[in-house]
């Protein structure tokens, strides 16, 4: 099964992934549709940690603790893609899933898919429909720096995945020169900002 | 081999589901004292709040047919004859078994048995309860309800009926709601917030002492502080007792071994099973779905492969129903408290030897998964816990994994 990998050394924190995800999940599928819409659903979040930045989201863990915690039959795994899918029609927003997710990948609000006039849990669905159509997840397709990729991952990685996020955040190749410079810059900027505090 | 389950609840449904997934083609009979497909008690309050009944059937409405099981419903099991491998139902029928899965859960406890027979007094435990409450509200155009008991189920009931538009009076004996899930400070904070958000009339340090019955129907309740309240509906949620009588003859639950067995042919799981705590070893009933589920799966593995052991239960729980205000708790509130709080959030962990012994996280779920993992892993956190509790961006887990602070998991 394929998963989304994050090469954090390449992330330039442009948030193109966040926008693409929001558009993919919006009924209008357009940028203008998102504007001022409180029900907009974004399943990926670019997090800045010291001088690093990287997009974080559901890891579609195996076993998935959220799935084991859900008492409503709302979370299941797609047998074809391996994606962990949350069905808002069954979800009661009880937070049993969020309570055990180490990645804080499950959030609550009244999205466009909420049917009962209250909040529901929502999270990344690996763009399951796109993937079944042989397309890339929207965030990966939108990432211009190569920080996000959608690749097969072997059993070893799967075993480590739940415990060790670094596996997903590997910088595997040697970085191109401009990235090195960019990272150096971020590091300095961060040092400067922390010094000012 | 013939496998019989007593109960069609969460543990039994998970057990049968996983048996079939693991390829078992054995004959399976499910016995239940209600007439429904397996349903999730965690979900049923939402039916009262106006959501579709179909969503309570968490494994689908055609479960029995899809799993190829015989369901004998609407008849209670009176007795298990463990010697003869036979179950006797209250309607006189008997069922033999090769393996028995005993998962009868628990029932509402009433201070006075005659309350049960009064029209307008309800428990809040089963789908039968919910349907009866729903009918009653429709028939009597009920406007006001008194909920007696401010524990998890009582608060769930109060919020569901508040959501439906009823005026709710919630009566609780303790100094704060959810007194088992919280310590004094956390519980007082949570109670204040619940009052603010919903306007529910919460009466603390009070009990319902008597009910006023006219023509067999409820007219009002009397309380320990001398107050009387006119109401045609009372929900009693002051506690539950395990349905362990058919197996052990008393209602103290069933103590099981590390394979979840009571005897070589009987597995026991869910809200009726006494199991050790995974971290402390303390034997008790840990009545939440994740424990029931794990017990059911362990029993399947042992039944099919003969070599599974249960590692114990975890007493984490979260109440986030009908409003977006989660109250999360786990473990025991003993040791050194470390607290972070602002106007909207209250977060406290109790440390013992630098490790998390228990915690309460009230108001959001942001750091809950990370803290749950630190608690389960029992790693030392005394040097890093303060900033984690104060984390409002949800980055503390990632910080530790990137090596920006100590206390890595695993
Ligand atoms: C209102 C409410 C809200 C809850 N919310 C949550 C939550 O948010 N999160 C959470 O983790 N847990 C929650 N719980 C607890 C959770 O529902 C239980 O832990 C779980 O259902 C336990 O599964 P079980 O199979 O042991 O019991 P149950 O699901 O209660 O099933 C027991 C079964 O046994 C049957 N039975 C009983 N006696 C007999 C008999 N003599 N003969 C034949 N059949 C019998 C019953 O009909 C039923 O089918 C909630 C419970 C309630 C009541
Ligand atoms: S919040 Fe929704 S998906 Fe999560 S455990 Fe509750 S019902 Fe399941």
Image (tube, coloured by chain):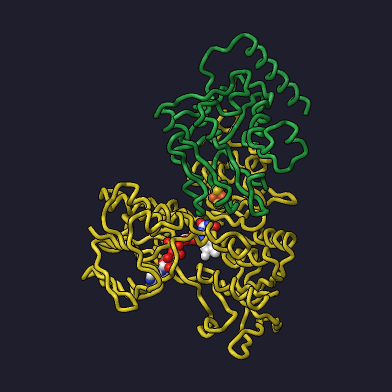
Chain colours: A green, B yellow
Judging depth in this view, the residue of A20 and B335 nearest the camera is: A20
Asked which quadrant contains residue A10, the reply is top right
Judging depth in this view, the residue of B12 and B91 nearest the camera is: B91
Q: Position of residue B103 (x, y in %)?
A: 38, 63
Judging depth in this view, the residue of A103 and B401 nearest the camera is: A103
Q: Quadrant of the N terminus of chain B?
A: bottom left
Q: Tell me if residue B228 can be seen.
A: yes
Relative to B331, A38 lies left or right: right
Q: How many marks overall?
A: 0
- Please, which residue is most extreme toward the bottom here? B215
Q: Position of residue B38 (x, y in %)?
A: 44, 61
**Which residue lies at the image location 75% right of the left edge and 61% below the top edge?**
B196
**Which residue lies at the image location 42% right of the left edge and 57% below the top edge?**
B62
Asked which quadrant contains residue A196, the reply is top right
In the image, residue B400 above or below residue A11:
below
Relative to A141, B59 lies left or right: left
Q: Position of residue A179 (x, y in %)?
A: 63, 13
Q: Position of residue A114 (x, y in %)?
A: 64, 48
Relative to B82, B298 lies left or right: right
In the image, residue B358 above or below residue B222:
above
**Which residue lies at the image location 27% right of the left edge and 73% below the top edge?**
B94
Asked which quadrant contains residue A186, the reply is top right
- Please, which residue is most extreme toward the top here? A177
- Please, which residue is most extreme toward the left here? B84
Q: Tell me if residue B243 can be seen.
A: no
């Amino acid at each position: 099964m394929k998963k989304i990998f994050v090469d954090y050394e390449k992330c330039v924190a442009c948030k193109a992934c966040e926008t693409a995800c929001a558009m993919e999940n919006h009924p209008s599928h357009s940028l203008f549709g998102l504007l001022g819409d409180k029900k907009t659903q974004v399943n990926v979040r670019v997090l800045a940690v010291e001088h690093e930045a990287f997009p974080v989201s559901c890891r579609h863990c195996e076993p998935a603790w959220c799935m084991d915690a859900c008492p409503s039959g709302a979370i299941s795994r797609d047998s074809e893609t391996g994606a962990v899918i949350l069905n808002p029609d069954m979800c009661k927003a009880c937070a049993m899933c969020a309570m055990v997710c180490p990645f804080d990948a499950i959030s609550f609000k009244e999205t466009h898919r909420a049917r009962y006039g209250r909040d529901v849990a929502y999270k990344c669905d690996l763009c399951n429909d796109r993937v079944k159509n042989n397309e890339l997840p929207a965030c990966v397709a939108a990432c211009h720096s190569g920080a996000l990729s959608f690749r097969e991952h072997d059993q070893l990685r799967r075993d480590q995945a739940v415990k060790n996020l670094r596996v997903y955040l590997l910088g595997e190749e040697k970085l191109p020169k401009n990235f090195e410079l960019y990272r150096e810059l971020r590091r300095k900027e961060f040092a400067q900002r922390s010094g000012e505090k | 081999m013939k496998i019989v389950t007593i109960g069609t609840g969460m543990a039994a449904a998970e057990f049968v589901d996983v048996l079939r997934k693991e390829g078992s083609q054995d004959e399976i009979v499910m016995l239940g004292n209600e007439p429904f497909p397996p349903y999730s008690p965690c979900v049923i309050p939402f039916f009262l709040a106006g959501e579709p009944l179909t969503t309570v059937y968490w494994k689908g409405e055609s479960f029995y047919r899809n799993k190829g099981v015989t369901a004998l419903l609407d008849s209670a099991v009176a007795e298990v004859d463990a010697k003869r491998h036979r179950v006797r139902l209250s309607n006189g029928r008997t069922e033999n078994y090769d393996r028995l899965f005993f998962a009868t859960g628990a029932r509402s406890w009433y201070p006075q048995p005659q309350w049960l027979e009064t029209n307008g007094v309800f428990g809040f435990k089963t789908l039968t309860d919910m349907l009866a409450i729903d009918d009653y509200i429709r028939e009597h155009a009920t406007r006001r309800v008194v909920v007696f008991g401010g524990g998890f189920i009582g608060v769930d009931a109060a919020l569901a009926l508040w959501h439906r538009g009823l005026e709710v009076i919630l009566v609780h004996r303790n100094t704060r709601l959810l007194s088992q899930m919280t310590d004094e400070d956390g519980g007082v904070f949570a109670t204040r917030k619940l009052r603010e958000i919903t306007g529910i009339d919460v009466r603390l340090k009070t009990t319902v002492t008597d009910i006023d019955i006219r023509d067999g129907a409820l007219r009002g309740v009397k309380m320990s502080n001398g107050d009387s309240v006119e109401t045609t509906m009372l929900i009693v949620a002051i506690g539950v007792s395990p349905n362990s009588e058919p197996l052990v003859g008393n209602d103290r639950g069933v103590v099981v071994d590390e394979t979840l067995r009571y005897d070589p042919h009987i597995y026991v799981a869910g809200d009726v099973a006494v199991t050790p705590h995974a971290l402390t070893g303390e034997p008790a009933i840990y009545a939440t779905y994740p424990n029931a589920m794990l017990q059911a799966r362990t029993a399947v593995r042992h039944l099919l492969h003969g070599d599974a052991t249960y590692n114990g239960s975890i007493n984490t729980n979260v109440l986030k129903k009908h409003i977006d205000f989660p109250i999360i708790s786990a473990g025991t509130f003993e040791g050194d408290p470390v607290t972070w709080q602002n106007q909207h959030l209250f977060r406290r962990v109790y440390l013992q030897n630098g490790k998390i012994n228990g915690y309460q996280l009230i108001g959001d779920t942001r750091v809950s998964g990370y803290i749950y993992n630190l608690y389960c892993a029992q790693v030392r956190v005394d040097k890093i816990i303060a900033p984690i509790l104060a984390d409002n961006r949800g980055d503390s887990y990632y910080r530790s994994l990137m090596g920006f602070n100590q206390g890595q998991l695993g």
